[in-house]
Image (spheres, rainbow, N blue to C red):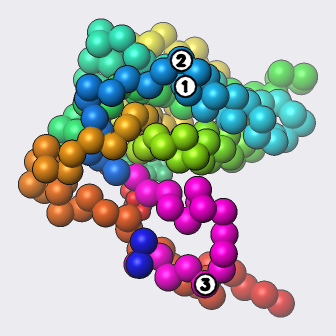
Amino acid sequence: MENRNLRYDIMPEIAAHWSPRAFDENQPVADDDLFALDEAARIAPSCFNEQPWRFIVARSPESRQKLTACLSANNQLWAGKAPVLTVILAKANFSHNGKPNRWHTFDTGTAWGYLSLEAQHRGLITHPMGGFSVELVREAFLVPEDYSIVAVAAIGYYGNRDNLLPQFQERERPNPRKPIDEIIDIY
Ligand SMILES: Cc1cc2nc3c(=O)[nH]c(=O)nc-3n(C[C@H](O)[C@H](O)[C@H](O)COP(=O)(O)O)c2cc1C
């Protein structure tokens, strides 16, 4: 974590969080752990308390294969080994008045953040992906048109970095972050 240059003593789950690709294909995620992650997401705050997030969880070999086939070629090379793949959806319109919810992806991102930190807390790893075909996912999992398909993510346990293809082994480390003064403007 040396390239994160932490100056403050933040929550250990946040400090230690990164996005590995070396999933252990032989270690499943127990029901209690998986549902605890979804419980963490469930508690996230949202505009009008709409809770627009929805998760499709692919655990069976058939479902994981179906979802892996929707990923970009590069992501297919490593993500198929994760014991859990999830599609993160966000309902685009408010339930109370049917009007567009401008914050649906913002709120869903918060829920994903909660989920991934609970995963970190439980010794699991997570890796979100934008590299997938929205059209293929919509078709394969019959996602209604009023749901935005925000991301796909892999969830599981850390395996062996040496099992990754060489191009991923080089990248198998926490990435650096911008310094604080590049992300805030104080007036
Ligand atoms: C919305 C989103 C989309 C991403 N898409 C991909 C992807 O398609 N493939 C991939 O390997 N990593 C993907 N990542 C992972 C990022 O590259 C990673 O989070 C970032 O480089 C920081 O790395 P670190 O958390 O491991 O330090 C994505 C992350 C996010 C949040």
Across the whole image, how many numbered discs are drawn on residues? 3
The earlier-in-sequence mark between 2 and 3 is 3
Residue 44 figure quarter = top right
Quadrant of the rendering where the N terminus is positioned? bottom left
Q: Secondary structure at mark 1?
A: helix
Against 1, residue 120 (above or below) is above
Asked whether the residues under the numbered discs 2 and 3 touch, taking CB atoms below 8 Å apart as contact, a structural biologist would say no
Give the numbered dot on residue 5: none
**For the residues bearing labels 2 and 1, Cβ distance under 8 angstroms:** yes
Q: Position of residue 6 (x, y in %)?
A: 56, 79
The residue beneath circle 1 is 34
Q: Tell me if mark 2 has few (under 14), some (14-19) or many (20+) residues whose alpha carbon lies within 10 angstroms of its own.
A: few
Q: Which residue is mark 2?
A: 31
Secondary element type, mark 3? loop
- Is residue 55 in sight in this rendering? no
Is 6 included in the stretch rendered in magenta?
yes
Magenta region? 3-19
Q: Ligand 1 within 8 A of label 2's CB? A: no
* Inter-mark Cα distance, 1 to 3: 33 Å
**Looking at the image, is mark 1 or mark 3 earlier in the sequence?**
3
Can residue 106 be found in the magenta stretch?
A: no
Can you identify the residue that label 3 sits on? 7
- Give the image location of residue 88, x and y in percent: 54, 31
Specify the quadrant of the image occupied by residue 140: top left
| Helix, strand or loop for the magenta stretch, by majority | loop
Which residue is found at the position 42% from the left and 18% from the top? 58
Q: Find the residue positioned furthest to the left.
A: 166
Whether pointer 1 and pointer 3 mark residues with C-beta atoms closer than 8 Å, the reply is no
Q: Nearer the viewer, residue 4 or 122?
A: 122
